[in-house]
Image (spheres, helix red, strand yellow):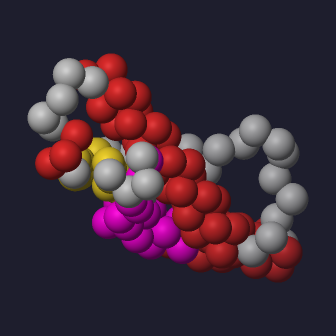
Amino acid sequence: MRNLGDMMKQAQEMQAKMAEAQEKIEVMQVTGASGGGMVEVTLSGKGDMWQVQIDPSLLGGDDKEVLEDLIVAAHNDAKSKAEELVQEEMAKVTGGLNLPPGLKLPF
């Protein structure tokens, strides 16, 4: 029975670490850029968009589609960076456990 008690304690510790990691992720800020930095998008670790910055030189022309594409590209860059940070944070919590491929944390 001692092993079961130890396992329960470890599970509780991991649950507490997971909650702490989720709090960190919520306040993380990640910025993605496109067009040589002319468009920047800032996301939270959860993927919520917080800010969009557009260089004023992009606003004067008739290149609406170019600006739209740059915004999408900057968002995708930020999303990729956020996912990477989340994976790093979760790796700290799981302590290098070999989790099945495709298992996404937090649940």
Residue 69 showing in the rendered view: yes
Q: Is residue 16 left or right of residue 14?
A: left
> x and y percent of residue 80 in the render?
56, 49
Residue drawn at x 27%, y 24% is 63
The image shows residue 11, relative to residue 72, as above or below, that is below
Of the 4 image quadrants, the one containing the N terminus is bottom right
Which sits in the foreground, 83 or 99?
83
The residue under the point 84% across, 45% down is 100
Magenta residue span: 17-34
Q: Is residue 31 highlighted in magenta?
A: yes
Residue 106 visible from this viewpoint: no
Q: Nearer the viewer, residue 57 or 70?
A: 57
Q: How many marks?
A: 0
Q: Does the magenta portion include 47?
A: no
Residue, far front: 61
Magenta region, main secondary structure: helix
Q: Residue at x 13, y 35 (%)?
A: 60
Residue displayed at 20% across by 22% down: 62
35 shown above or below 90: above
Q: Is residue 77 left or right of residue 1?
A: left
Q: Indicate the quadrant where residue 25 lies.
A: bottom left
Give percent across and percent down for residue 71.
Answer: 34, 37
Which quarter of the rendered picture does the C terminus lie within? top right
